[in-house]
Amino acid sequence: MTMIREESGRAIITVIGRDQIGIIAWVATKLAEYNVNILDISQTILKEFFTMIMVVDLKSATLELVELANSLEQEGLNKGLQVKVQHEDIFTYMHRI
């Protein structure tokens, strides 16, 4: 099966929710299962809320961006987390003049 990738092959993942043990481990494990490489990660706790932003490489991913986004979003909801996956090009085009 040939995978079609957008221009950069990278995505931005955001995770927000009440802090709990294992959030980073859960996301990293899911990404590894789908052969998605984490390029950069930033996370912090704001009061009792966990926030994380990741830049990931989709070039070797075993599923398409939309499938990845749906999977992480659904599983995140079950954990009380809001997980969003957006292609990097969205951010690039938003800031062009």
Image: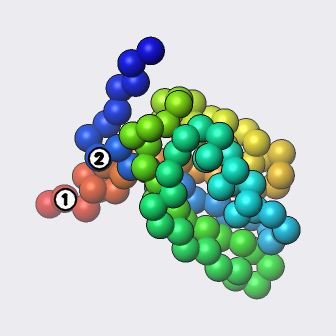
Q: In the image, what residue occupies the spot 72% across and 72% down?
A: 50
x, y (%) of residue 88? 36, 52
Foreground: 55 or 45?
A: 55
Tell which residue pokes out farthest to the left in this image: 97
Please give the label number shown on residue 51: none
Q: Which image quarter holds the N terminus?
A: top left
Q: Kindly indicate the quadrant of the structure image that contains residue 75.
A: top right
Q: Quadrant of the C terminus?
A: bottom left
Task: Decide if residue 90 is in sight here.
Answer: no
Residue occupied by mark 1: 96
Decide: is 83 above or below 52.
Answer: above
- Relative placement, left or right, of 9 versus 84 is left
Location of residue 39 in the rendering, given as x and y in whole percent from the top left corner: 45, 61
Task: Determine which residue is flagged by label 2.
Answer: 8
Amino acid beneath label 1: Arg
Rendered residue at 25%/52% (across/down): 93
